[in-house]
Amino acid sequence: MEPLTWSGDLGPFLNPILAFSAALFATGFVANFALSLVGVRPGEVVVNADRTLTLRRTPVDLAVAAMKFATLVFALGVLGYILGGILLADPLRAGIIGGVAARLTPVWISLAALFALSIAFKRKLGLYGKLFDSPIGMIGLALVMFWVFAAIFSGMIATHGPISVVSGMRNEVPGTPLPSPAEGQYAWYLLGGDALGRDVFSRMIYGAFEVLKIAPLATLFAFMVGITLGLPAGYFGGKLDTIITFLANLVLAFPVILLFYLLVTPEIVAAGIPNYLSMVLFIFPIVFLVVLFNSRFRTDPPRRNLLVGATVIVGGVAYLSLISNPSDPELPRLFRLWPEMLDLFDVPGNLLIVFVSVVFVNSPTVFRIVRGIVLDIKTRDYVAAGQTRGEGPWYIMLWEMLPNARGPLIVDFCLRIGYTTILLGTLGFFGLGVSPESPDWGSTINEGRRLLTIYPHPALPPALALMSLVLGLNLLADGLREESLKD
């Protein structure tokens, strides 16, 4: 069977278009930079004597227009590869790029549907809808949702299993065919094989699922802890604020990587310290929801009792299932008391340690952000109005102050997911990831770097995937910040 080329039959038509767009963009960028050095400014609208408006253009405007046109042409070329790969279907004709684009068909369909619906109803979607007025925000959202949908449809997209090994494919270059593919098996390694003969493309796709199943949820838990502690610390002040702030500063004083090394050492794990931390940290979402419903519906006891009771029961069972594992004899006895028949799910030990560590490291920073916001807005008129009406302090904190702080918190949430993603990649790189055979991007980069000068293809795809996801989160946060400031 023939190996795949990078562009297949699409290359003779689309490669010149992409090369032209790249050259035009580079020319416009250099011209813009050079003109800015000599003091040439963009054009401006001038009011004439007869009160008519005239747009005076300068060479800078032409350079910027050339860059925009080049970007549009490049986007059309990429779209041509995507459509060509889907329509040609045959990887030998579509090439590696077209083959990858064809495998990602569920992602393209989902992105098109998401953007079409969001743009159609953007005026009814609040801050999220306003995001589609920001080009930077839309690019960031597209990058983030690309990997979210790739993680969701990873089983449909990947061509092979994440740990499936073909001994004859060790360090093979992209597009190499399998020596003897089985019936119905995908016949190529689109992005080549790693040192063990595993498919790099499939491991990159499954790695998105490994990263996204931890980073957003761990960040959400960290926000629950930080908000639950930061609101009363900033609102009440006094000794409560002093004690919590001191504890937060203690955690922040430790270097992050050193703290992770301490939490994952065998002696610390054997002592059950990560499990005891999970007991403390995982109770905060339940406390947050209970206080939220109680403060909101305290004048409606039946509804309040229903919501609080459901939160306590459902959250309590999930909490006990989360922290306990009756079938693990190595855990302290306290974490094996919950009956196995009521244990709904078990979290693998490595995953629990990484999850708890991420929450523990991020919570103090979120606490300081929330505390600072509360200190700033607790003197506002609407807070005084709520106090005058006789509202309780938790109602004022959760239903008056927290909604008015949503802009900075949403932006920080997006940025913190990016930080957490980098942190997970760093942990995987140092061998502290979920498991040795996990396809998470950090572990894959670490495995590929050993032969990077000879075989760069195993390490580059996960590195670019990690970079693009973090870049998308940063651009999304910039777009949200830009739109939230307009409110």
Image (cartoon, rainbow, N blue to C red):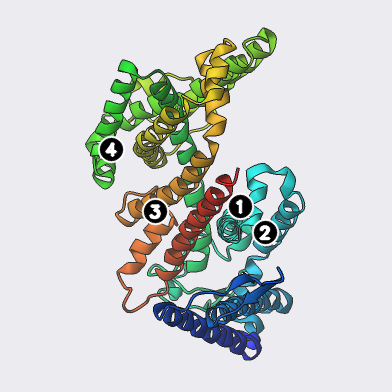
Q: Quadrant of the N terminus?
A: bottom right
Residue type at mark 2 is Leu
Q: CA distance from mark 3 to mark 4?
A: 18 Å
Q: Position of 430 compared to 176: left or right?
A: left
Number of numbered discs: 4
Q: Secondary structure at mark 3?
A: helix
Residue type at mark 1 is Ile
Q: CA distance from mark 2 to mark 1?
A: 12 Å
**Residue at the disc numbered 4:** 252
Of the two numbered discs 2 and 1 on the same chain, state the one appearing first in sequence.
2
Of the two numbered discs 1 and 4 on the same chain, state the one appearing first in sequence.
1
Q: Secondary structure at mark 1?
A: helix
Of the two numbered discs 3 and 2 on the same chain, state the one appearing first in sequence.
2
**Residue at the disc numbered 1:** 152
Residue type at mark 3 is Ile
Q: Nearer the viewer, mark 2 or mark 4?
A: 4
The reply to whether residue 291 is in sight is: no
Q: Secondary structure at mark 4?
A: helix
Q: CA distance from mark 2 to mark 4?
A: 38 Å
Residue type at mark 4 is Leu
The location of residue 473, given as percent across then percent down, is 50, 54
Mark 3 touches mark 1? (CB < 8 Å): no
Q: Nearer the viewer, mark 3 or mark 1?
A: 3
**Residue at the disc numbered 3:** 422
The location of residue 485, given as percent across then percent down, is 55, 46
x 36%, y 53%: residue: 428
Q: Nearer the viewer, mark 2 or mark 1?
A: 2
Q: CA distance from mark 3 to mark 2?
A: 24 Å
Farthest residue toward the front?
49
Check disc 3: other Cα within 10 Å, few if <14, some if 14-19, many if 20+: many
